[in-house]
Amino acid sequence: MADISPAPSDTTRAVITARGVRKHYGAIHAVDGVDLDVREGELFGLIGHNGAGKSTLFKMMLGLIPLSAGEIRIDGAPVSGGDFRAVRRKIGYLPENVVLYDNLTGLETLHFFARLKGVAGQNHAALLERVGLAHAARRRVREYSKGMRQRLGFAQALLGQPRILFLDEPTTGLDPEAIRGFYAILRQLKSQGVTTVITSHILAEIQERVDRLAIMAAGQVQASGTVQALREQMALPLWFSVRVAPEDFEAVRAALGSLPVGAIEARDDHVAVQCPREAKMAVIAALAALGDKVRDLGVREPSLEDVFFGFSD
Ligand SMILES: Nc1ncnc2c1ncn2[C@@H]1O[C@H](COP(=O)(O)OP(=O)(O)OP(=O)(O)O)[C@@H](O)[C@H]1O
């Protein structure tokens, strides 16, 4: 399901800023000079190979581990400064491996985390219902499935109605329906101005849903922007799928003969045409001139996976 709410404009204030951020563990440069701005109300994706530095960057943004160099500000406050305590209360965090206590029920878990976070006055039963766990509120976590644990982890991140959410691989273990429900909640939160940073390895899931994203590799941001901007920056070709009768395959070739298209491959009931973005409209015009011979036409944009491999390899 595509996110149809508008992306925050370029002028929206940055809630998270990172400048020259580094984290070294001895000789390992886990994060190696990251500059990043995340705007208020934005749903921002952070993607990268295993070990690219995403979780380390998250932990620094949360003030959980010190920076080796650089500066991160959340809501204007440096994460290493005294003012960050107050900002910390506005942040919700779902770690990659959320630690839950098997002997507690779902409700008790939320009470426990609420005390730990110092937030009171929230209806925990309603929060469990929001993440689809109302039926399991009084069951012990030891009886929870992987997806239920993940939902409970998400619920704890939402305690205290945070304005900024850091979610590290939040959809791991969720079934497709739960993933939809999860993003529906993120959209609601976004409409209330909540800023969310999310990591995921499931690129197909993230590409339709984030406003902007950053691709990390070897501790650095290789590229950032909207999925469409990254596609254009990579100048990856599109693919047309032109459905025609086999006897008309040659007519398609001939119609495209003078255009700067790439591969033209005849398949079962269609011709696949690789096309640079700038030739897209000329190709459509040439195919339209074939009239009824063209029975159907599809265009496949490069996927986020194509873009990802282009930037991260
Ligand atoms: N406490 C630590 N001590 C030493 N090296 C570490 C530590 N934490 C992370 N690293 C190293 O830093 C690099 C980045 O790790 P990080 O966990 O940030 O990657 P990631 O992008 O979150 O990976 P994944 O997608 O697998 O979760 C890796 O090489 C990792 O081994």
Image: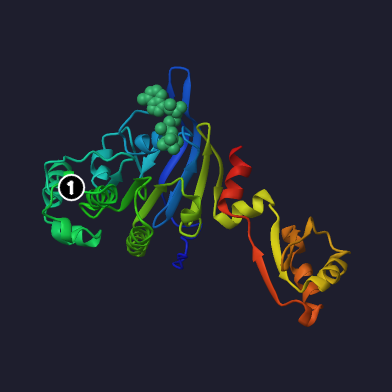
Question: Looking at the figure, which quarter contains the N terminus?
Answer: bottom left
- The residue lying at 75 percent from left, 69 percent from top is 281
- Going by the picture, which residue comes out furthest to the top? 26
Q: In this view of the protein, can residue 159 be seen by the observer?
A: yes
Q: Residue 261 is drawn in which quadrant?
A: bottom right
Q: Residue 158: image x %, image y %?
A: 25, 53
Q: Amino acid at mark 1?
A: Glu
Q: Residue 194: image x %, image y %?
A: 34, 57
Between 256 and 183, the one lying in front of the other is 256
- The answer to whether residue 20 is above or below residue 246 is above
Q: Residue 256 is drawn in which quadrant?
A: bottom right
Ligand 1 quadrant assignment = top left
Q: Residue 264 is drawn in which quadrant?
A: bottom right
Q: Residue 173: image x %, image y %?
A: 34, 48
Q: Horizontal placement of 165 versus 27: left or right?
A: left
- The answer to whether residue 169 is above or below residue 189 is above
- The residue lying at 47 percent from left, 35 percent from top is 50
- The residue lying at 30 percent from left, 33 percent from top is 64
Q: In this view of the protein, can residue 69 be seen by the observer?
A: no
- Going by the picture, which residue comes out furthest to the bottom? 292
- Crowd class of label 1 (few under 14; some 14 to 19; many from 20; radius 10 Å): few
Q: Horizontal placement of 291 versus 231: left or right?
A: right
Colour logic: rainbow
**Residue beneath disc 1:** 143
Task: Name the secondary structure under disc 1.
Answer: helix
Question: Looking at the figure, which quarter contains the C terminus?
Answer: top right
